[in-house]
């Protein structure tokens, strides 16, 4: 009976050092393979080796996972077959060569060659041969191991590579999820890097909540998001609201550039222990039909069960209003929006979309947001706080500096003010003096306004 319970990705070991259970398990896989090959080539009675059990003192990621998941012998063998080439390149080749010293075909064993990897990579056929040999009846009973109802496949820990139409499905390469393989082998998971396969980048900040200047009403809405992150599990499971609510939480941040939307998303992650990934829309959107959906699917699949915060900056470029269908381009653009609706609504984490203008967003998205937060341009008193917080302690403001007057006269956002302060501080460093005058600040303000065409 295959298990049906879900489990989150395994916790990495604190010191990253793996104990002996994985090594012992690979020795078991080797013995299992030899026993099957002896029975096949030498007609000796087949005796299945005893399945190893992880010792309680072994705190490695692999041992803890096997204990927690309570893997059956068949499931353990599946997982070990997928992991083995990541440890020893010629794992299966070294064993099989003893039985075929002159080489030759061995189709029953399955296996494929990779593009760069020169050893044998196991397929579903490899595992089926090890478990059942040529016993057709046993093979049929074991087929569910590779289906969507299977514990390892349903939870995306293992997968079979898709094969060409007409070829047996089990001839596809058996693959372990890259992150599971990494934590099993090294005890930790490295953060994914921005790439075509993962169109998002990790963002963090050294700033604190006190550095963010927002109206109290906006802060109250942000606290609602923080509350959802903190109590999500209790709400959906212990209070049984998972039957009534859609998974995840969707928020729209809108307002002028530089008003704190990105910083707020980053601080939410910092203070709730969640990684924040800003989606690179230029890597997501493609002019080729179907590629945008493919890129987004890769992103959401990677984020599944990670508790990440996904932040779509300038989201109206991708999530904008759908148009009337005038040509094939409009049809596929609308399909992209519909696909995004589907994936965002099924994503179990926090998704934040940021836009300069709420009206740019498609109405279908607006209705689906759990929270809509407006980040207004800072008022004069807010701008004064921003000016005071922006200057470093090393900068010495002269007596003629009147930040209150500057804040009242010039309607700048937080990012503008930081640009001005950077310019002023660099000018002071060039002069070799920490002193900053009102003239220096006004020069920086003029420069910033000219950049904005004002």
Image (cartoon, rainbow, N blue to C red):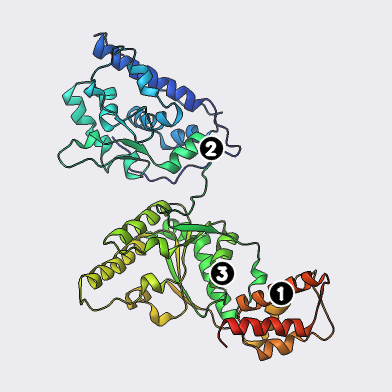
Label drawn at residue 389: 1
Please tell me which residue is depicted at 54% across the width and 31% down the height of the picture.
18
Horizontal and vertical percent position of residue 385 = 70, 80
Q: Nearer the viewer, residue 118 or 133?
A: 118
Q: From what the image shows, is residue 190 above or below residue 245? A: above
Q: Quadrant of residue 379?
A: bottom right
Q: From what the image shows, is residue 103 above or below residue 2? A: above
Q: Of the two numbered discs 2 and 1 on the same chain, state the one appearing first in sequence.
A: 2
Secondary structure under tag 3 reads helix
Please tell me which residue is depicted at 58% across the width and 75% down the height of the picture.
219
Q: Quadrant of the N terminus?
A: top left
Horizontal and vertical percent position of residue 182 = 48, 39
Q: Of the two numbered discs 3 and 2 on the same chain, state the one appearing first in sequence.
A: 2
Mark toward the viewer: 3 or 1? 1
Q: Of the two numbered discs 3 and 1 on the same chain, state the one appearing first in sequence.
A: 3
Label drawn at residue 187: 2
Please tell me which residue is depicted at 30% across the width and 37% down the height of the picture.
2
Secondary structure under tag 2 reads loop
Residue 248 visible within the image: no
Residue ID for mark 3: 264
Secondary structure under tag 1 reads helix
248 left or right of 439?
Answer: left
State the residue lying farthest toward the left: 166
Binning the other alpha carbons within 10 Å of mark 2 as few (below 14), some (14 to 19) or many (20 upward) gives: many
Binning the other alpha carbons within 10 Å of mark 1 as few (below 14), some (14 to 19) or many (20 upward) gives: some
Q: Quadrant of residue 414?
A: bottom right
């Amino acid at each position: 009976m295959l298990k049906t319970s879900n489990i989150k990705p395994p916790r990495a070991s604190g010191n990253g050092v793996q104990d002996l259970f994985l090594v012992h398990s690979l020795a078991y896989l080797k013995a299992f393979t030899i026993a099957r090959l002896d029975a096949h080539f030498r007609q000796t009675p087949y005796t299945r080796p005893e399945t190893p059990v992880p010792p309680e003192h072994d705190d490695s990621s692999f041992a803890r996972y096997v204990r927690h998941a309570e893997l059956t012998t068949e499931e353990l063998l599946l997982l070990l077959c997928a992991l083995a080439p990541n440890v020893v390149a010629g794992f299966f080749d070294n064993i099989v060569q003893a039985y075929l010293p002159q080489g030759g075909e061995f189709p029953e064993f399955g296996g494929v060659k990779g593009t760069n990897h020169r050893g044998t990579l196991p397929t579903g056929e490899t595992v089926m041969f090890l478990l059942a040999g040529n016993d057709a009846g046993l093979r049929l009973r074991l087929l569910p191991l590779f289906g969507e109802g299977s514990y390892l496949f349903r939870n995306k820990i293992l997968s079979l590579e898709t094969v060409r139409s007409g070829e047996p499905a089990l001839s596809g390469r058996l693959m372990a999820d890259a992150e599971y393989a990494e934590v099993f082998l090294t005890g930790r998971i490295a953060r994914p890097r921005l790439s075509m396969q993962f169109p998002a980048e990790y963002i963090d900040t050294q700033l604190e909540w006190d550095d963010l200047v927002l109206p109290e009403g906006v802060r109250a809405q942000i606290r609602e998001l923080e509350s959802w992150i903190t109590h999500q599990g209790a709400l959906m499971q212990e209070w049984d609201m998972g039957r009534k609510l859609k998974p995840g939480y969707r928020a729209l941040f809108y307002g002028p550039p530089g008003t704190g939307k990105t910083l707020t998303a980053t601080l939410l992650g910092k203070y709730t222990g969640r990684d924040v990934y800003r989606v690179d829309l230029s890597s997501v959107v493609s002019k080729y039909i179907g590629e945008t959906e493919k890129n987004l699917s890769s992103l959401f699949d990677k984020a599944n069960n990670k508790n990440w915060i996904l932040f779509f900056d300038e989201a109206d470029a991708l999530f904008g209003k759908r148009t009337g269908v005038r040509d094939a381009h409009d049809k596929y653009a609308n399909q992209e929006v519909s696909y995004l609706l589907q994936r965002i609504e099924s994503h179990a984490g926090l998704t934040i979309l940021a836009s300069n203008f709420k009206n740019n967003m498609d109405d279908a998205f607006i209705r689906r947001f759990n929270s809509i937060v407006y980040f207004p341009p800072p008022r004069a008193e807010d701008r004064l706080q921003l000016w005071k917080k922006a200057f470093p302690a090393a900068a010495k403001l002269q007596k003629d500096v009147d930040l209150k007057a500057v804040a009242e006269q010039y309607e700048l956002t937080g990012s503008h003010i930081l640009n001005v302060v950077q310019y002023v501080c660099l000018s002071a460093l060039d002069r070799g003096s920490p002193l900053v005058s009102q003239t220096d600040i006004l020069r920086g303000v003029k420069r910033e306004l000219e950049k904005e065409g004002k």
